[in-house]
Amino acid sequence: MKNIESKLTESRKYKPDAQFSSNANLNPKLLKELNSLYKKDPDKFWANLANKEIKWIKKFKSICTGDAPFYQWFKEGKLNISENCLDRHRGNNKNAIIHITENNQKKIISYDDLYLLVNNFSYSLKSIGLKKGDRVIIYMPTIPESIIAMQSCARLGLIHSVVFAGFSSESLKNRINDCSAKVVITVDSFMRNGKVIQAKAIVDEALMNENCPTIDQCIVYKNLGKKIIFNDRDLWWHEILSPKTEIVEPEVMSSEDSLFILYTSGSTGKPKGIIHSTAGYLLNCIITNKWVFDLKENDIFWCTADIGWITGHSYVVYGPLATGSTILIYDGAPTFPKPDRFWDIIENNKVTIFYTAPTAIRTLMKLGEDLPDKYDLSSLRLLGTVGEPINPKAWVWYQLKIGNKKCPIVDTWWQTETGANIIAPIPGVTLTTPGTCTKPLPGIEIGIIDDYGNNVDSINEGGNLVIKNPWPSMLRGIWGDKKRYLDTYWKKYNNKFYVTGDTARKDKDGNIWIMGRSDDVVNISGHRLGTMEIESAIVSHQYVAEAAVVSYKHDVKGEAIHAFVTLKNNFISYNNSDFSDDLREWVKKKIGSIAKPERISFSDALPKTRSGKIMRRLLRNIARGEDITGDTSTLENENILIQLKNIL
Ligand code: WTA
């Protein structure tokens, strides 16, 4: 590998606010103690935290055991996550959830009520015959009932798999079948951007014609009260609830029992079902909520992520509830009805911690740089970002206009696979610079290494980002595909390091800068998509012969998709611009709106090597408006480059 060159040169430094530091969960002394304990005795470091943060039914004896890369954490321990999130916060008269709908309805649920709601729904799930280990798909927007569904699964030891409610029926069907789910939980419909989205109809389409033979039942929560088609397998949520409140003892779970599967894109066409465990996952969720978000019981934490993504799992549902704070959830679009919606919600609900994606920040900044000035955002004390690199301009605006210069910004790097934050600032301690996620958290050792496993030592030189030690919330595998787990994450360095798939560099202060992906994964608006997945959706269209998908830099989305397409010879009836729209709709139908290509170019052929491999590198140069560099001598059809450049 020719090491990756870095061009960024941002060096502004921001010191933590003194008042924030003096009350922070971690100060320099505590951080130093944590780091030195980890260095001296990693087992003791993790055991101390696990003892302190988790309510165990039975204590663990061992810490990290098993051969690489099949690690087990706290394996003799017994616990239940829903007990950790709910039972232990009862009786404090505290709010658990503030829910705001797109139509501006507000509902508040206390911990005591949430406990009862989860118990009652757990009883229903049990009474329809679900048992520990069964898989349940949750295809719902971010509303209290989806959280109740997740927590109820955790209470009974059912393995949930939340599918983002923006995914198409086909994506949903593939996920249901991959994990052989027994039940789907959904809603009649929900609102997004002022429009009604018919979730139940999408589920019906996924399940039709015996497409999903393992599904026994579909539970429907009446959300908007819109008409739906009701089939034999369907059950209304409210009709399966017991009329009196039932209490369900939490299932005694082993530390290593699976808590959930969450699908994420990889470099083949098929999404990977990432498996997370019980105790290890919970531990990293709790400590990162406390260390990185400085979460305390009085906080009102608004993480804007949908529950369909890992951020929604760890920083909406599991971490903050296990920590006993109040979460705010907003079930609507950030710009509806106007681009000041977020700021209005923060002011009205006195949100103290706000966590969102750089894309949202850039969109809101573009639509109204001064809009936040009209709002009192003084309740905020900490801001976070996740999902993609944040450009310094957006970081500085966020710090100035939203944080009023006093809120630390935590730029958190992590992945579906890591379960929780891995590289992030400690808000009361770390000197931050816009654009870097700074340094690994206590207990995490990261490396930047070349393709041969050597450390990349020079300052600002790029290499592969790896994690060198096992950590409690690491993924436990890919559902049903051990080989892919080994090949994707471990094979490159003989099971020694976890391969993140990202490239990164370290600056002179030791801060980590994420440079991008080293595989065929693109990051559109903070959402991971495999280019192969989009390519296979496009080529499944009857008129398409071949397609190649690359990304290019986009002002708002971070990256956007450019699809290069060749059509079949018999294709004559459309002109290209109509057909582009048809293809976009086709991709939406196959995967979901987030995967729609921004640009589509049609040409007679795609640039290929003599052995028939599409040269995506050249297409990337074209899409990004760069000169074509590097070797083109293996190209079979050089003329095609001229045609492609002329089209753009
Ligand atoms: C990217 C989201 C730069 C990265 C939690 C990673 C980031 C992928 C950051 C995981 C960040 C996430 N700075 N890049 N702070 N956070 N990424 O699985 O490429 O949806 O590998 O998890 O997003 O995306 P995923």
Image (spheres, rainbow, N blue to C red):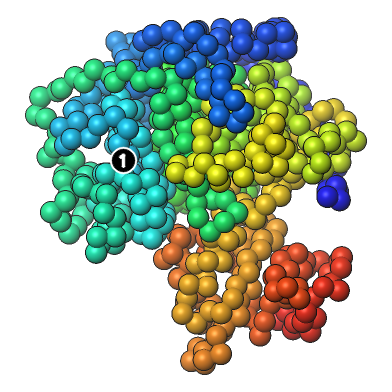
Q: Identify the image quadrant of residue 410.
A: top right
Residue in view at x 52 percent, y 73 percent: 539
Residue in view at x 63 percent, y 69 percent: 548
Q: Residue furthest right?
A: 458
Q: Is residue 384 something one can see in this rendering?
A: no
Counting from the top left corner in percent of width and height, residue 177 is at 35, 52
Residue neighbourhood size for the residue with mark 1, other residues' Cα within 10 Å, grouped as few (<14), some (14–19), many (≥20): many
Residue in view at x 82 percent, y 28 percent: 510
Q: Is residue 146 left or right of residue 281?
A: left
Tag 1 residue: 136
Q: Give the structural element (helix, strand or loop) at label 1.
A: strand
- Residue 500, above or below 173: above
- Residue 609, above or below 591: below
Q: Is residue 145 left or right of residue 357?
A: left
Q: What kind of residue is marked 1?
A: Val
Residues 198 and 489: in front is 489
Quadrant of image for the C terminus: bottom right
Counting from the top left corner in percent of width and height, residue 112 is at 27, 18
Q: Identify the image quadrant of residue 599.
A: bottom right
